[in-house]
Image (tube, rainbow, N blue to C red):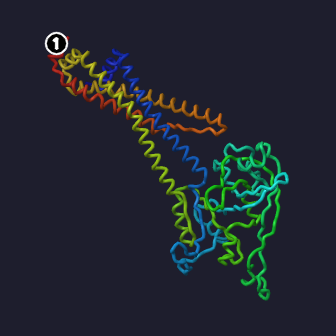
Amino acid sequence: MKPRDLTDLALRNLREAILRNALTTLGVAVGVASLVAMLSLGVGLQQLAAKRLSQSGLFDTVFVTPKNNFGGMGRPRREATPEKPLRVLDDDARRELEKLPNVLEVFPQVRFFTEIRFHNKPFATVVAGMPDSSKNSGSFDGMQGNFFSSLTANEAILQIEFAKDLSDNPPALIGQDLVLRYAERQALPSANSNSPAGSPSDAPGGFSVVPRELRLKIVGIVETEPAAGFGGPGNARLFMPLATASTLRAAQVNDLRDIVRDSSAGKITYASLSVRVKSPSQVEALETSIKSMGFGAFSLLDASKSLRTFFSVFDLLLGIFGSLALAVATLGIVNTLVMAILERRREIGVLKALGAADSDVQQLFFVEAGVMGLFGGFLGVFFGWSLGRALSIGTNIYLKRQNLNPVEISSVPWWLVLVAIGFAVLVSLVAGLYPASRAAKLNPVDALRYE
């Protein structure tokens, strides 16, 4: 039997019992819709998490620290050797890191305890310097007010809880001024006054602390703590441009450490540096290069791998539960085709009497099952996409009422559409195996006698 004749005959048979076949196809569509909705939810949440983490700059960042030479917890003291020198993380090291391949920027963790005076009242807090790239991190999305107007602006962004400490009406703080009181480091002259100026012995022997004040304009209020995580003594509640914070030369926790270790030779050193690369795929190679320079380096790649594993298992479980409805739909296809055999025994007998082979009869029922699966797959993808959109809209309505930013929790990529339709057709063909085999085994004489 020619493929065209086979298809025409199958479509005609489906039209004759249109209600029953339509309900069977609708059952397949419901099964596919549940599968698509479940998987789209998993894909959407995974994309949302990946987007947030990617914007945060954590997964394309290597955190560099100096290797200390202190022993502890039963470990021997690490001494410097020609093969493994204990390098200081200073401006020279920063410039070396900036020259490494695929490096976008290198910036220090500037964070210090200080006192804020607002309306002549003191408030103790932690200040953090934020690089200009942090405005794209997602942490400042939905903030009240604006980001810093320039890299060196005397402006501040407050964390919401700190803003509530300053005022009962936090939004009213935007545009007002506050005073930042901090301790500025000033190098002390060398005790060896007989050394010529500029000689190595003329390096400062320490630093003094001088109180300073800086007036800052409040330009925004943010919900989260964007500078949380690495290299800081505590959660910061006031943020200012990194370039401005760096020029303050404010005393930090690592200053006392450097004096005790006598490793800085009067140079400004950093407790840690953040090195951003062009792509997360380049982080591992950069880590290796930094470690070979004599510094400590680490990143969050391990956490990223664990996250991908979690979402893979999550998607698998959602797919299994979503497939249960499709499994029920296969029973409907089996039932429909078995009933069709009973109703069309005479037709099958006539086909065989006219010379149709058993394979032709099998193909006829396979085509009918495949058509129901194909139409059910298309309808199911549409229903599943609609359900996912409804979930996203409902979620965003709730988030809006909670004054939170909208999100997309559902996503239907093209590969999910193809997989869902292909899976529906495959399941339908499998469901048609038994009815097709049973129809092919009918004796044409018995079939023609059947009334």
Q: Quadrant of residue 331?
A: top left
Near-viewer residue (276 or 323): 323
Which image quarter holds the C terminus?
top left
Is the residue 353 above or below the residue 397 in the image? above
Query: Residue, x 71% and y 66% (percent of image)?
Result: 252
Which three-letter amino acid code belongs to the residue tagged 1?
Answer: Arg
Residue 22 falls left or right of residue 302: left
Is the residue 225 above or below the residue 45 in the image? below
User: Which residue is outermost to the bottom?
Assistant: 194
Residue 423 falls left or right of residue 63: left
Near-viewer residue (248 or 238): 238
Count numbered badges in the picture: 1
Which image quarter holds the N terminus?
top left
User: Which residue is outermost to the left?
Assistant: 445
Query: Residue, x 52% and y 40% (percent of image)?
Result: 44
Residue 48 visible in image: yes
Query: Residue, x 39% and y 20% (percent of image)?
Result: 23
Q: The residue tagged with tag 1: helix, strand or loop?
A: helix
Q: Quadrant of residue 103?
A: bottom right
Q: Position of residue 188 (x, y in %)?
A: 78, 77
Q: Which residue is mark 1?
A: 449
Q: Position of residue 33 (x, y in %)?
A: 44, 30
